Structures are given as structure tokens and as C-alpha cells.
Image (cartoon, rainbow, N blue to C red):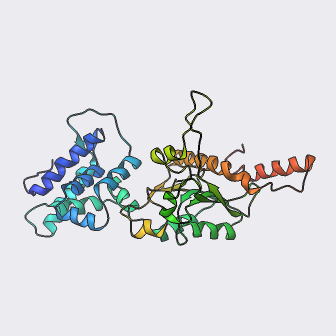
Amino acid sequence: MTNFDRFTERAKVSLQLAQEEARRFRHDHLGTEHLLLGLVREGDGIAAQALNASGVDLPKLRAGIEFVVGRGDSDLSEIGLTPRSKKALEIAIEESRRLNHEFVGTEHLLLGLIHDPESIACGILDTMQVDLKALGDIVNSAQEGVLFLMFMPGGSGVLKDVLALAKTRPDLLIRGVVSELPKGVDDEHTGKTTTLEVTIVGSAAPQPAVSRTFSVVQPEGNAHPTAWWAAETTHKQFKANIGNAIIHSKVLVVDPFSDDPTVVTGSHNFSTNASTKNDENFIVVRGDRQLAEAYAVNIQSAWQHYAPRLGNPHADLSGNAYLQALLQDQRAEEHFWRLTV
């Protein structure tokens, strides 16, 4: 059993806050992720200062934990430590003794947490430090394909890595949709004539992938729907309550149907700003096939919405030859989508 006599008041407060965070998520355990939340929420200790300096704040951390772990349904008043949390506290005490300190502070608790690279706390901290080079490495690790949806990724973001891979690896299925506001945020205030640039990457036929950009006028809607159940709105109402009807997702999936898929997402764009300037970064989830498959289907659905704009890849064919060409296109993707027996 851990002896808390040597713990500083800030360390004790952080542990109390960790319990509050576990209850907030309705979890039935006190894990390393909750201990990390407690350190950040305490706010004034050395650990909090170090984490804040690294760009880790409470809203971002909570969002990361909810994304990775999810919420529970527990109403327990007493929440016990997980084995990894107990080990983290033991290591914190050992670190304090090793440094000849007479106390165990928040800095020692942080050392205890980061000592175990397999813990949830370490995993979440790692995902918050992902930069564009790391994203490029993830893209280039693809063995079967890359699917993505991006909004305002910029010219120096990960999109350039995806497009470069499409040229060098025609054997991969590379497919996605990119939405851009040509004038940036200024385009959000210019009314219904504003155009959105939509770039479609991938082709209806097998690789090599193509990339084409189209201008799409923002939706207007009707003031008086033709049916009582319709929810059509005017452009003004739409912009006031919803926003632009465009691809606003930021998600990239590598090899979604393999045994080792990777999902990258985040609240900010796949751009330089997201990696170096904004207060939030990317979340990388590896090995979760169910999550990867769900995102893959979502991306494919969005891509198919725009794909007809690419034109008919077999316009020069007709009759049986045309149908055979379409069948060959489908068969070329069967392995990627795991449609073969």
C-alpha cells in the first residue's frame, strides 16, 4: 500500500483531482490517464508547468482520453487504482529517494507516469507530440492504401506526402477529398456566391490516381420546403446555425483492413499551423481495425459523392466491353476492401 505521508499538498491535490476526473468519465478505475489529468488540472505544480510548456492542456487531454478510452457507465463512489497506476506511484516514490528529496511532488508523479511507455497516459502524451514529419512517415508506411478527408491542409502539410506517394506507388489505393476556401477565412463572409475548391484524389478506374479541383458554390436552400418534413433552409439560416456544407473532416487512414491499420485525426487541419502553432495536434490510433474500417467506409462514401465529377474513365467503350471494364475496375479493389473470399 502506498504511503502518502511524504506527498506534497500539490501532489495530494492532483490525486484528488484524478479521482474527480475518473468519476467525470464514469470510469470504474483510477488509471494513469486520470493521474495525468490530475497533474494538469492542479495547474501550479512543476508537472503542470512542464506539461503546459509542452502544449498539453486540460481540454485537449480530456478530448484525447475520451477518444482513446471513451466514457463509462459506472456510479461507484470508491475508485481503485489500476496496477499500472500503483506502479507509477511506486516509481514516483523511488525517483524522489533517488534524487535525495524528502518529499514526493508532482514532478515525481510525472516521472512515474512516463516511466511506463505502454501506459495509456504515455500513449496519449505521445499522440500529442506528433508532427508533420511523423505523419509523412505514417503515410509512406502504407502497404495497401491511404484514404483521407481534409479541410484546408495547405501546401506544406501531409497532403503533399499523400500525392507524392500516389505517383511513386501506383499499386496502392489512394483516395480522398480536400476542401479549400480560396481566400481563407475571408471566404466565410462573402455570401452565397462564395466558391469552395474541392479536390478529388483518386480515380474511378484503377491507379494511377488522379487529382482534379472543382469550384463549388455554397448551398442556398429554399425558404419554403415542398413537404412538411423537409428541413431546407436559406443560405443565411444555414450559415448562422450550421456553416458551410463542405468536407470539414480531418482524418487519414492507412491500410484500414489490414492487421495493423492506422487512423490519424484531430480537431485541426493536416497543416503546418496544426503541427507548430495551434494549441492542439493530432491523435494517432494504431491497431484498432474496427475504428479504421468505420472511417474507411465514411471516407469512401464522401469520395463517391464527388467521384462522378471525374468523368467516365471508359467513355471510349460501349456494350460488353464497357461492362467488362467496370467489372475489372471493381476487381482491382477487391483485395483492399476484403471482398474476396
Taking the spot 35% from the left edge, 63% from the top edge, the residue there is: 279
Tell me where residue 270 appears, x and y as whole percent: 50, 63
- Quadrant occupied by the C terminus: top right
Picture quadrant of residue 260? bottom right
Left-right relation of 73 to 182: left
Examine the rendering and report whether any part of residue 270 can be seen.
no
Tell me where residue 258 appears, x and y as whole percent: 59, 52
Examine the rendering and report whether any part of residue 59 can be seen.
yes
Which residue occupies the foreground of this view, 244 or 125?
Answer: 244
Picture quadrant of residue 74? top left
Which residue occupies the foreground of this view, 60 or 236?
Answer: 236
Left-right relation of 317 to 55: right
Taking the spot 54% from the left edge, 40% from the top edge, the residue there is: 233
Q: How many marks?
A: 0
Q: Residue furthest top?
A: 228
Which residue occupies the foreground of this view, 321 or 122?
Answer: 321
Tell me where residue 188 appears, x and y as whole percent: 50, 58
Left-right relation of 340 to 318: left
Picture quadrant of residue 125? bottom left
Taking the spot 60% from the left edge, 46% from the top edge, the residue there is: 297
Which residue occupies the foreground of this view, 320 or 168?
Answer: 320
Tell me where residue 52 appears, x and y as whole percent: 26, 64
